[in-house]
Image: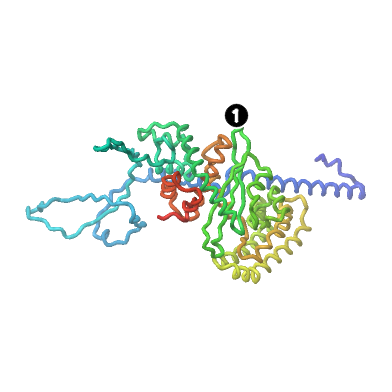
């Protein structure tokens, strides 16, 4: 529309028509502006990360600022006073488990004033935290060949089984490499550089070969965790993208890690928590159908259309995720400051307050509490959203968020009647954090086989972490025993059966 005032009609009828057209154009522009603002806010979140997603970058920035501030602060010589021994320590004391190395600073046995003998009145002890770099140890396995003095028969002790036959790495070293790569997110080429500083020149490809062989050795244990997860009456499912190097052309395509979790601690069960991962080169619906073809029960998940075939078959019952519903309103509130979105967030917070109160209680008590408190809140939230929707233009992000909420809430209501179900799918989403952090340290997964090996190791690492097991000690124990362990007793090696 032209901005020239000459186009404004003078006749009342034409002016009225002109005004109606102008208002329609302004409405369309407002909708476009609102849509673009929402898209920009989403792009900023995707690029720079949310508060939770960008915490590592924030910590790095804070570290740099603190280092710079400390460098600019002049060093002051400490002043020793009698009050130092009496004052309470201002910092947290060091833990007891690190070994203590004593260094006694003595003034001698004779008095510097008169030369008389000194006797000890007491002592002041100052703790100083130190770090001794890790060191390599070569275990020499010596097997003497013995000959009988009578019959000349020769005997020798058999070689013990090792994680990699005819290989040089020991169980503890292999466990360290796996933990550094998959839990501490340190790529193999960086580990190789660290080892080189210790005088051990080791190729990245050599480390990669060892990791692949160990993953194959540990696969039966990951399969045991899979069986355990699928034996639960309710599981949690989620997926996350990762770049996969396409063979032949050097380009990458989007592959997927899938996480399936079992965690019954919120309703007081003694069953240990576990997480099982799978890797696929794409996100086709056939993938989760293959993973879950033997499972029957409830599944917490987002609105991924690929799960629909499982729901239609009747073998799996869906439980929607309130966290996903809430996230839609949070995005709208951040981008537009919408009062309606803010009200929705506050009403959803009331549901989480009830869940906090119910956490750890048996299923029947959780159901009673939810029926008494959560049901009225959820009913009121649904009615309120239905009343707000007609007031909005159907194309706005807020309207989309409300429609999504009303659709998903219908598939969430079963949690009110079953105490072993949860309000959201955060259990599965938390299990993806390690992968999300790790993929920032590498550009892509090199092959589908490498992705499957990673899924095996992630399964073991996350399950050990969920059970508060030291992964270094547990994996060392497993790699020491698994080669000779009977496959029908593999459950004995699961993290929760590990004897510290």
Kind of element beneath mark 1:
loop
Residue at left offset 35%, top offset 33%: 199
Q: Residue 51: in sight, yes or no?
A: no
Classify 10 Å Cα crowding around label 1: few (below 14), some (14-19), many (20 and above).
few
Which corner quadrant holds the C terminus? bottom left
Q: Position of residue 99 (x, y in %)?
A: 30, 51
User: Is 313 above or below relative to 170?
Assistant: below
In the orientation shown, which residue stands out farthest toward the top? Answer: 248
Residue at left offset 32%, top offset 49%: 129
Residue at left offset 81%, top offset 46%: 25
Instruction: Between residue 84 and residue 389, name the one nearer to us.
Output: 389
Residue at left offset 57%, top offset 52%: 227
Q: Kindly indicate the quadrant of the structure image that contains residue 319.
A: bottom right
Please, which colouring scheme is shown? rainbow
Q: In the image, is 71 to the left or to the right of 436?
A: left
Which corner quadrant holds the N terminus? top right
User: Is 362 above or below relative to 62?
Assistant: below
Q: In the image, is 311 to the left or to the right of 81?
A: right
The count of marks equals 1
Instruction: Between residue 341 and residue 206, name the one nearer to us.
Output: 206
Q: Position of residue 342 (x, y in %)?
A: 66, 59
Q: Position of residue 114 (x, y in %)?
A: 7, 54
Residue of label 1: 250
Q: Residue 152: in sight, yes or no?
A: yes
Q: Position of residue 213 (x, y in %)?
A: 49, 38
Instruction: Between residue 382 and residue 87, name the one nearer to us.
Output: 382
């Amino acid at each position: 529309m032209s901005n020239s005032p000459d186009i404004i009609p003078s006749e009342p009828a034409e002016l009225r028509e002109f005004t109606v057209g102008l208002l329609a154009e302004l409405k369309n522009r407002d909708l476009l502006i609102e849509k673009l603002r929402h898209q920009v806010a989403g792009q900023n979140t995707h690029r720079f990360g949310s508060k939770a997603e960008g915490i590592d970058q924030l910590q790095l920035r804070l570290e740099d600022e603190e280092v710079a501030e400390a460098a600019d602060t002049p060093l002051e010589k400490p002043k020793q006073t009698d009050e130092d021994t009496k004052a309470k320590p201002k910092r947290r004391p060091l833990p007891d488990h690190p070994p203590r190395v004593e260094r006694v600073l003595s003034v001698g046995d004779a008095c510097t004033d008169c030369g008389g003998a000194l006797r000890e009145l007491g002592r002041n002890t100052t703790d100083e935290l130190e770090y001794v770099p890790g060191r390599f140890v070569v275990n020499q396995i010596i097997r003497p060949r013995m000959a009988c003095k009578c019959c000349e028969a020769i005997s020798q002790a058999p070689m013990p089984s090792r994680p990699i036959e005819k290989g040089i790495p020991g169980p503890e070293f292999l466990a360290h490499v796996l933990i550094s790569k998959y839990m501490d997110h340190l790529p193999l080429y960086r580990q190789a550089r660290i080892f080189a500083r210790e005088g051990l020149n080791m190729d990245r490809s050599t480390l990669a070969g060892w990791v692949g062989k160990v993953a194959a050795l540990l696969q039966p244990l990951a399969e045991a965790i899979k069986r355990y997860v699928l034996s639960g009456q309710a599981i949690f499912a989620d997926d996350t993208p990762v770049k996969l190097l396409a063979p032949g052309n050097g380009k990458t395509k989007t592959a997927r890690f899938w996480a399936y979790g079992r965690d019954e601690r919120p309703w007081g069960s003694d069953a240990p928590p576990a997480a099982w991962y799978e890797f696929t080169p794409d996100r086709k619906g056939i993938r989760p159908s293959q993973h879950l073809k033997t499972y029957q029960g409830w599944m917490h998940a987002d609105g991924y259309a690929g799960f629909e075939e499982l729901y239609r078959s009747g073998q799996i019952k869906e439980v929607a995720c309130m966290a996903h519903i809430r996230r839609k309103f949070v995005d709208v509130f951040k981008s537009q400051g919408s009062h309606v979105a803010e009200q929705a967030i506050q009403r959803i917070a009331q549901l989480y307050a009830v869940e906090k109160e119910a956490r750890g209680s048996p299923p029947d008590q959780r159901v009673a509490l939810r029926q008494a408190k959560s049901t009225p809140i959820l009913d009121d939230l649904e009615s309120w959203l239905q009343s707000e929707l007609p007031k909005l233009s159907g194309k706005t992000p807020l309207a989309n968020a409300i429609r999504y909420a009303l659709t998903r809430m219908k598939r969430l209501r079963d949690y009110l009647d079953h105490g072993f179900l949860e309000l959201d799918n955060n259990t599965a989403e938390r299990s993806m954090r390690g992968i999300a952090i790790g993929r920032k340290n590498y550009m892509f997964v090199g092959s589908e086989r490498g992705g499957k090996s990673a899924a095996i190791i992630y399964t073991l690492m996350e399950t050990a972490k969920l059970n508060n097991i030291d992964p270094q000690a547990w994996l060392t124990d497993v790699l020491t025993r698994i080669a000779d362990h009977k496959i029908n007793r593999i459950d004995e090696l699961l993290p929760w059966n590990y004897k510290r």
